[in-house]
Image (cartoon, rainbow, N blue to C red):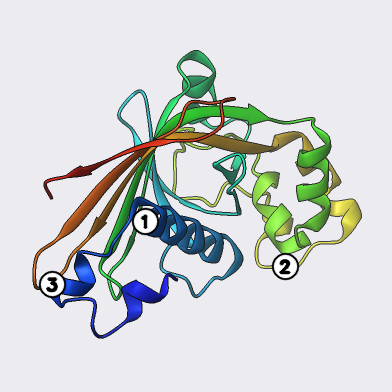
Amino acid sequence: MADWLTSPDFGRQDRIMKLTFEDVIQDITDRLTAGANSRKSAMHTAVVATADCDVRVMVLREYDPALRRLRFHTDARSPKVAVIRDNPLVSVLVYDAEAKVQIRMRGQGIVATTSPQAEAAWDAATNFAKRCYLAKAGPSSVSAEQTSGLPDWAEGINPTDAQVADARQNFALLYVTVTEFDWLYLANTGHRRAKVSVTPDLPGWTADWLVP
């Protein structure tokens, strides 16, 4: 993360006065990149909300700072896929309690099922992870009894390549291209908050300091 945020002198007034929007953007980039690359990161799991006001926790798989784009994995049969295809507005929240940093994001979601990137992500996944997409019915389907949704033979095993082959049709990528970052640092000496806005397909950004 940014050196200024981890410095014990950050709380000093003269140190706070040196905080810039570039510092904030770098901190966002560092934290989201770490979140995508490390299971130990507090930002490895994110709260994702769709236009129907439904929310869920999803694993952050990748952050592309050049595109300001987040990547998640999902079941193509999930209700959120239909919602996003009808209304692509998506909000994402991550929070690091130890660092006292919250990042809220708004953006445009898109679902990809047959792209080269989807194929690459599928190939990179373990068979144990692929097993999740063997569920006979899609997520949120009503069941007469408690169930994992998996066929009986798939319960508790690490399946072979052949056994998970049929699951590929249910696997999809969810991309969220962020158009607005809302960054909040909870400091004992006084919180700090900034909003960074981005126009897709255009270089640069605009930013404002906000009252926390």
Q: Position of residue 180 (x, y in %)?
A: 38, 35
Quadrant showing the N terminus:
bottom left
Q: CA distance from mark 1 to mark 2?
A: 44 Å
Return the disc, 3 or 1, that comes first in the chain's sequence: 3
Alpha carbon distance from label 3 to label 2: 56 Å
Image side of residue 113 versus residue 175, left or right: right
Which comes sooner in the sequence, label 3 or label 2?
3
Residue visible at 42% across and 61% down in the picture: 27
Name the residue beneath numbered marker 3.
13
* Disc 1 target residue: 24
Label 2 SS: loop
- Amino acid carrying label 2: it is Ile
- Amino acid type for the residue under numbered disc 3: Gln
Image disc number at residue 157: 2
Q: Picture quarter containing residue 173?
A: top right
Discs 1/2, front: 1
- Give the secondary structure at mark 3: helix
Q: Position of residue 204 (x, y in %)?
A: 50, 35
Residue that appears at 86% across and 61% down: 160
- What x and y, as percent, mark residue 38? 57, 70
- Residue 205: % across, % down: 44, 35
Q: Is residue 97 above or below residue 132?
A: below
